[in-house]
Image: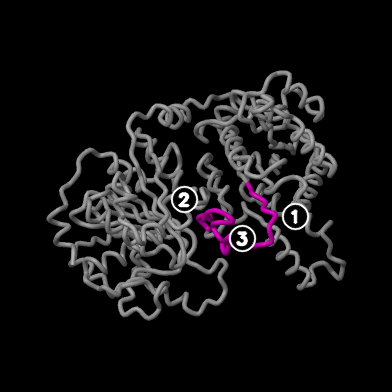
């Protein structure tokens, strides 16, 4: 069995434990170690698949079709770890497993309790990931904050694991807050002291403290934290705010975090720098001189985490093209009764992301039409592809009542409809078309130019599909179906002729984008948006208006 790093958080939520875990994974990979990263979420949902984006943020999808916490996206973006459904466990998943075992009689009539049965199940899940993925180090992020009632079984489980394995096989890292009180001109260490004190009350002593802070920490403040939190001076690590999240591994490297971790885990490894990461990612982010403005027209714009992977993939596209991407977040509901030019006129590109439900759909249709008629590079993703289909059917094909059966079950022209295998499903969780599926790409298309492949694999999360009864009509009007899921003849990608760059895909390309390896569609979308050439679509647009 490999070794373990347990990451906990204190004082407040949203301290960046996920970014810290991903950055530590990146550092350890740079030292030649194989890692994987897990997220333990203390809510009772079996997974986040049925949760509202306003509460949870985006749902990240793995290759094997698991709906997971968005932090797993950070893990895959920063590292080469192969993330699967086992890398995200929830209280609901743990309790469900234990209850099913109890119903089958696996506990031989014993009274089933939180300790040892729930905690043992948590430990087994963590050990399973380490063993099956055959890694040197498993990084385990515990969601929530120390002191939360719902987190206690997870904290007890990792306390037991460190006791069982010994200090050189398990390491506790605690992420805490050092607030800066502007009126006093001081950083305060008390929140960190209290957080560590609360952690020690339940039997966990941190080996390393990551101090989230707006300001740099003085030597005196580090000494104070070390003294009152009973850790080594070198174990107080500054985690100051940075301009770009991809600078975090470099900041941790400068603090000597990787050396400290390897020392405490008694691992010998060659010291290597992060020069490639710095040159390819960070320097391009810092030094980009050209700017492109991308309008993201969505339903959940007010919550930054709702489209987290979309935003990051756009940044990756900027890195690949050496340009700065400025994202203009447009609420599709506001577009419904407004002139789209008011929100979109200064956009170099327009992206319509995924989502569910009818709210804001009319606004998204307006955004697609504006991009199509004005020659603005467009990328539609999942629902965005379906919206592009509806818009084209209405405004080019003349099917004024065209719609998706998700929004109007009685529509006479269901250009988007429910798959047959989805019709009788009653439950909501984990019942969509989920995970990685192959897609055959047509040659001499924008899509093939991007991928340079005839066969690709992309991740899905949806129930509705393009209605093939309308393929002929769409093709006559200038649509190219450039991507097909051949086993079921499902449309995966379509493009428009007579447009600089218009691609709509049923899958989620953002889930496979990395900062040093931008997804091909995002890379070429940003390239098109950054192009100074503006094609005159006036004649084509007139032909496409009915």
Disc assigned to residue 150 = 1
- Residue drawn at x 25%, y 56% is 372
Q: x and y percent of residue 324 in the render?
A: 38, 35
Task: Return the x and y of residue 351 as percentages of the image width and height.
Answer: 36, 52
Tag 3: Cα neighbours inside 10 Å, few (<14), some, or many (≥20)?
Answer: many
Characterize the local packing of mark 1: few (<14), some (14-19) or many (20 or more) Cα atoms within 10 angstroms.
Answer: some
Quarter that holds the C terminus = bottom left
Q: Which residues are magenta?
A: 38-64
Q: CA distance from mark 1 to mark 2?
A: 29 Å
Going from N to C along the chain, the mark reached first, 1 or 3, is 3
Judged left or right of residue 527, residue 203 is right
> Which label sits in the foreground, 1 or 2?
1
Residue designated by label 3 = 47
Q: Is residue 49 part of the magenta span, yes or no?
A: yes
Q: Is residue 178 left or right of residue 56?
A: right
| Location of residue 240 by image quarter | top right
Of residue 21 and residue 213, the one placed in the foreground of this image is 213
409 versus 487 height, above or below = below
Q: Secondary structure at mark 2?
A: helix
SS for callout 1: helix
Q: CA distance from mark 3 to mark 2?
A: 18 Å
Q: Is residue 102 left or right of residue 179?
A: right
Image location (x, y in percent) of residue 94 = 71, 60
Of the two numbered discs 1 and 3 in the rendering, the one whose residue sits closer to the viewer? 1
Residue pointed to by mark 2: 511
Residue beneath the point at 69% across and 41% down: 7
Question: SS of the residue at dot 3?
Answer: loop
Rounded to the nearest angstrom, the CA distance separating label 1 from label 3 is 15 Å
* Residues packed near mark 2 inside 10 Å, few (<14), some (14 to 19) or many (20 plus): many
């Amino acid at each position: 069995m490999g070794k373990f790093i347990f990451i906990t958080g204190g004082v407040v939520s949203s301290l960046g434990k996920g970014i810290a875990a991903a950055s530590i994974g990146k550092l350890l990979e740079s030292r030649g170690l194989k890692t994987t990263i897990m997220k333990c979420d203390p809510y009772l949902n079996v997974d986040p698949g049925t949760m509202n984006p306003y509460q949870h943020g985006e749902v990240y999808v793995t290759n094997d079709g698991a709906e997971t916490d968005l932090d797993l996206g950070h893990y895959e973006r920063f590292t080469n770890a192969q993330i699967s459904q086992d890398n995200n466990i929830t209280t609901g998943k743990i309790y469900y497993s234990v209850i099913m075992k109890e119903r089958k009689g696996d506990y031989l009539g014993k009274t089933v309790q939180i300790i040892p049965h729930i905690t043992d199940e948590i430990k087994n899940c963590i050990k399973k990931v380490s063993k099956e993925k055959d890694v040197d180090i498993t990084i385990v992020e515990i969601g929530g904050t120390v002191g939360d009632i719902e987190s206690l079984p997870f904290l007890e489980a990792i306390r037991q694991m460190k006791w069982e394995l010994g200090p050189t096989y398990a390491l506790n890292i605690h992420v805490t807050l050092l607030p800066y009180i502007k009126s006093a001109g001081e950083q305060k260490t008390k929140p960190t002291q209290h957080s560590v004190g609360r952690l020690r009350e339940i039997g966990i002593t941190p080996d390393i403290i990551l101090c989230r802070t707006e300001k740099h920490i003085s030597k005196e403040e580090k000494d104070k934290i070390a003294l009152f939190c009973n850790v080594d001076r070198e174990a107080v690590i500054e985690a100051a705010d940075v301009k770009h999240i991809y600078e975090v591994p470099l900041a941790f490297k400068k603090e000597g975090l990787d050396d400290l971790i390897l020392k405490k885990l008694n691992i010998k490894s060659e010291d290597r720098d992060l020069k490639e990461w710095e040159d390819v990612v960070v320097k391009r982010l810092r030094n980009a001189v050209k700017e492109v403005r991308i309008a993201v027209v969505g339903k959940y714009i007010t919550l930054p985490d709702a489209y987290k992977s979309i935003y990051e993939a756009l940044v990756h596209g900027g890195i690949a093209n050496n340009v700065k991407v400025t994202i203009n977040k447009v609420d599709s509901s506001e577009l419904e009764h407004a002139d789209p030019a008011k929100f979109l006129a200064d956009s170099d590109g327009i992206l319509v992301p995924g989502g569910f439900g009818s709210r804001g759909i009319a606004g998204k249709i307006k955004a697609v039409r504006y991009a199509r008629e004005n020659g603005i590079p467009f990328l539609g993703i999942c629902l965005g592809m379906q919206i592009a289909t509806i818009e084209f059917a209405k405004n080019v094909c003349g099917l004024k009542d065209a719609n998706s059966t998700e929004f109007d079950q009685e529509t006479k022209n269901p250009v988007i409809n429910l798959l047959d295998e989805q019709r009788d499903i009653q439950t909501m969780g984990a019942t969509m078309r989920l995970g990685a599926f192959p897609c055959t790409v047509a040659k001499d298309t924008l899509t093939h130019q991007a991928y340079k492949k005839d066969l690709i694999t992309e991740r899905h999360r949806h129930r509705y599909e393009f209605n093939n009864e309308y393929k002929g009509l769409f093709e006559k009007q200038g649509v190219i179906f450039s991507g097909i899921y051949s086993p079921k003849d499902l449309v995966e990608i379509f493009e428009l002729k007579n447009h600089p760059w218009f691609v709509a895909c049923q899958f989620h390309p953002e889930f496979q984008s990395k900062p040093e390896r931008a997804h091909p569609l995002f890379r070429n979308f940003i390239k098109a948006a950054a192009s100074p050439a503006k094609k005159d679509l006036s004649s084509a647009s007139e032909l496409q208006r009915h």
